[in-house]
Image (cartoon, rainbow, N blue to C red):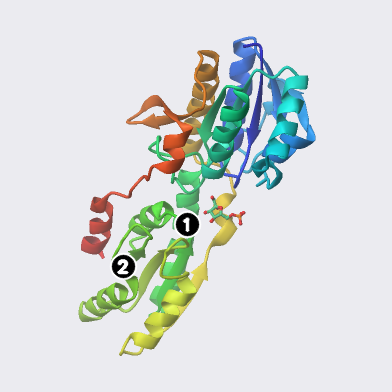
Amino acid sequence: MKRIAIFTSGGDAPGMNACIRAVVRGAMYHKVEVFGIRRGYSGMIEGDIHPMTSRDVSNIIQRGGTILKSARSRRFTTPEGRQQAYENLKALGIEGLVAIGGNGTFTGADIFFNEFKIPTVGAPGTIDNDLYGTDFTIGYDTAVNTALDAIDKIRDTADSHDRIFFIEVMGRDSGYIAIQSGIGGGAEFVVVPENASEPVSAVIKTLKQGFVKKKSSSIVVVAEGEKEGRATEIAEKIKKTIDVEVDIRVTTLGHVQRGGAPTAQDRILASRLGLGALEGLLRGQKNVMVGIINNRLTYTPFIECITKDKPISDDLLRMVHILS
Ligand code: F6P
């Protein structure tokens, strides 16, 4: 393989730049030409594809976002869009792809590989940490630390005013950010979609136990993907149901969790996964996602990564309950 291309797709995540850097520098080391595709699958369809060298990735390891930009492309979901993308790659003699992204990115990569057989290796880049086939995804650690910083600050106000705060964190379908930031921030309750129990009565029960223990303030972390509703709706239901007077506020952290300089852990993870993706591709891996499981590099078929669940350990949910 002498010429490859790299792109980032879906929601940006801190550490994506470190991953791009590892792929480009790794390609230089192995004497492989590398092209950068801008704005993910949209740029692939529009032919927004440019050669990259070592200098293009200087001074980016510490930057959040993605220098290649990102997008969620509707056109790539159509056969015509994918055909156009293939023609563009073929015209440039691209023999392999490194895709950095999450669930949607690998769903597209799997379809594209089955149609056109261009070997593709994915690197997991999403703050949600919801991909099977890796213990951690690029950007997750930074997002958890950002959420934690916010929780610590909100706790000051919760304590000063004897209030109950509901803090909504990101996670389209998963509660990973919620559980980790909840444990790290000493939350009284964490509401996650993975927990089957009905949250409203469970939160009320915990809050009441807190009153008995003379707690005057509480933090409830809610994952945005919770099936019962967003944090505002859950807080509203609790206000209506609880039979004691409570002063409740809701804070939604939103996209602040996607930005900022990546943590050391994310920079190192992204560098390992980027080089692992590139070297896997050069060794003949295709239609797989590189991951790190128990500190070892692994390659898992895209289809497993996008269809299998990565459940949150019951131990973590139990821990929140015991420590609250
Ligand atoms: O997948 C990452 C993520 O930040 C999710 O946590 C969130 O639900 C979604 O992306 C938001 O997407 P967008 O930035 O397109 O609104």
Give the camera-side residue of 79 and 200: 79
Residue in the foreground of this view, choosing between 285 and 219: 285
Seen in the picture, residue 94 relative to 20 is either above or below; the reply is above
Crowding at mark 2 (Cα within 10 Å: few <14, some 14-19, many 20+): many
Mark number displayed over residue 188: 2
In percent of width and height, residue 315 lies at 23, 51
* Residue occupying image coordinates x 48% and y 69%: 230
Left or right: 94, with 198 as reference point: right
The residue depicted at 33 percent of the width and 61 percent of the height is 186
| Image x and y of residue 183, in percent | 33, 56
Mark 2: amino acid? Glu
Quadrant of picture, ligand 1: bottom right
Q: Amino acid at mark 1?
A: Ala
Q: Is residue 39 visible?
A: no
One can see residue 113 in this view: yes
The x and y percentages for residue 241 are 35, 86
Mark 1 CB near ligand 1 (8 Å cut): no
How packed is label 1: few (under 14 Cα within 10 Å), some, or many (20 or more)?
many
Residue labelled with disc 1: 147
Q: Disc 1 on helix, strand or loop?
A: helix
Give me the C-alpha separation between circle 2 and circle 1: 16 Å
Give the residue displayed 44% in from the left and 30% down from the top. Answer: 301
Circle 2 — which element?
loop
User: How many numbered badges does the structure rendering display?
Assistant: 2
Give whichever of 108, 21 is nearer the camera. Answer: 108
Q: Nearer the viewer, residue 53 or 41?
A: 41
**Left-right relation of 201 to 181:** left
Query: Residue 184: image x %, image y %?
Result: 36, 55
Residue 109 lies, with reference to residue 184, above or below; the image says above
In which quadrant of the rendered image does the N terminus lie? top right
Q: Is residue 154 above or below residue 55?
A: below
